[in-house]
Amino acid sequence: MTARSVFGELRKRKVFQVAAIYGAIAWAVTEVVVTVSDQFFLPHWVSTLAIIGFVVGFPVAMFLAWTFDITPEGIQRTTVESTRGKASIFLSLLMLVAGTLGLFLLIRPVIETAETEVQPAVLLHNSVAVMPFENRSGDSDDVYLSDGLSDDLRDQLNLVAGLRIAARSSSITASELPVDVKTRAAKLGVASLVEGSLNRRGDEMRVAVQLVDGSSGLLIWSETFQRKPAGLPDLQQEIFEKIVKHILPDAEIATDPITRNSDAKEAMLLANYYEQQVRLREQVDTGMLDKAIGLYREAVDLDPDSAIAHSRLAGALLYQGDLQAAEAPIFRALSLQPNLSEVQHTLGLFYFARGMPEAVTAFRRAVELNPNNADALEYYAYTQWISGIQENVVELYRRALQLDPLSLSRYGSLGVLLGKEGRVDDVLNLIPRIEELFDGADAFRLISQLYELTGQVDQAIGWAILARDAEPGNIDHVQYLAELYTEIGDFETATMLEPSPGIGLLYRMGRYRELIELAEDQMIEEPEDVRVRYLLAFAYNASGQFKSAVWVLSSTGLPDTVLTLPRMGADWEGFSALLNALVGAGDNEAAQGLADWFVDKPNHHDNADWVVESMMACYLAVLERDTEALAKLELMKRSPRLPQASILNDSPCLKKYADEPVYREVVEFFEARREALRERLPATLKEFGVSP
């Protein structure tokens, strides 16, 4: 059969028509599946399964189109009018494979875009953002009333099943953008906006509220309320109910205000205002935080049955670091209303600060009670990940970002996780979005950190210099930049940037004697900073002072901190330092017990990053499982980012492999990468137009 006759048969049997219709349906349905998956936070395998189903079904559809035809008499087998032969079979199969591949390439980008790009959600009718209310009183002291009313209204709307509420931080950021309502709604990913103003004159308050359609900018509802301050709780409830009725007319409204006591309400609004001011600043204003705590205590006294008042008092005390004082109010809140997401979230923070595994359960419960609680979503994800659990962690971070799409910190949390999971492409896809949305030193610093996680340290240095130059008075940027130079082995430039290096820089440069002197003093000045103790213990180990390392680490809560719930990645560093110290001090039984626990732990991160592989190599070495240990060292070469040279060169557990070819090859491999980065750096900095 000739090619012409094959195409004639295909046209006769309407195979091309069926293929076109099938492809259009596959693409459209995949788009719908991806959208629905995003909105209902379904796992990404749902979308992937859609691709597999359509691709597998394509050859079946083509076979049926070739074999059967739909006629007025029904479905009938198509008659053959041309000669069959080997050539026709080969050509038909070739076209079928090409068509199947074409379909795959058509619908695959839909999934890839959904998985790698973080875009605001499609504007669902039940999505809303509460913008900060404007203070029109002419008195800046009344800002706490306008801000507090919008904050409490947002929190109350968050409790309504079926509503999707944009997070506070993104709502505030959007309100400050010089854009129209439609652009603001699009950036927040919501269908409608709540706007308002408050004007207080003596003993009278005038509150104007409006609900605006985000796609058209048209007014849906507006109303002005005249009340005395004592009527503030009832006013908030009335506004809340009217908004819900306009967005979800059939919704059941059973949510009460946080308090019906007007004095307690005003105390909580002022306390919340002070607390938010403290949290927004780099340096904690202890005086302002004390004022917030005092006002929360006042609110609790005025309304002892307000679970939210007790919960917020506990939250402020936790932020202050007073775990003991926070215990009574959080458990009082729990006894009053255990099914409030905010209460469960604060409970999770309390458990997390105590290093208790119950934190994961509390954060999970907070998310179940309110899927819009972005903070709970992120903490739930983080506590799972730090414990070694990977399931749904990325999806949880993405959900938090969808609810808080204008928050740089949310992008940072997701990007750092992806980087530490070794997902280079996902990180690189995230960076342009950050560049588009944010500007300034904080954004430059985050982009630098993300490039460092992908192993592109020259790019990281360029962005770090931009951050430093944007905020020349911020010493943190200079210290971070110096650390990046140590990462590529350029200690000279690092020392030039920081002539009096801190503990972190001394650790990276292997200057352990100086580190010990500095850290011993700093441990006394900052007794709560366990990271100082971890680095001091590492320096003791590298210097052969193992008993001193054991003594320092005994004051940090290790190993219990890691055995129950690690609070940060540095806890794992301390755990490794403890294991090495025990070996060096001759307590092999204790060291092997800890190594056994980690090696047998079921939830290890399965990624290309070097951290887990180096830890596994160390612990297997302690267990004298040398072949496995060397295999783990070999796997370190997969890591996109560079390992800390001190870990490879100065960890006591790895010293016995100093003459092993595998170990030497790994060390030389990363040294070669550092040298290549040093050679590439001048050209990169020239592109940036900057210098160290």
Image: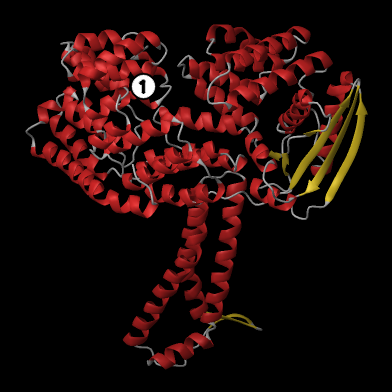
Name above or below for residue 462 compared with residue 567: below
Which residue bears the numbered disc 1? 571
For mark 1, does the 10 Å Cα neighbourhood hold few (<14), some (14 to 19), or many (20 or more) residues? Answer: many
Number of numbered markers: 1
The quadrant of the image that shows the C terminus is: top left
Q: How is the image coloured?
A: secondary structure
Q: Is residue 103 visible?
A: yes
Task: Give the residue at x 91% y 25%.
Answer: 227
In the depicted structure, whether residue 278 falls above or below residue 431: above
Relative placement, left or right, of 276 versus 550 is: right
- Horizontal arrangement in the rendering, residue 654 relative to residue 156 (left or right): left
Q: Nearer the viewer, residue 449 or 7?
A: 449
Residue nearest the viewer, comparing 336 with 512: 512
Nearest the viewer among 598 and 530 is 530
Secondary structure under tag 1 reads helix
Please name the residue shown 54% across and 83% down the image.
Answer: 14
Image coordinates of residue 517 in percent, x first then y, are 26, 13
Image point (27%, 7%), residue name: 551
Quadrant housing residue 2:
bottom left
Report whether residue 49 is seen: no
Q: Is residue 10 left or right of residue 222?
A: left
How far across and how far down the image is residue 184, in percent?
69, 48
| Residue 576 image position (x, y, % from top left) | 27, 22
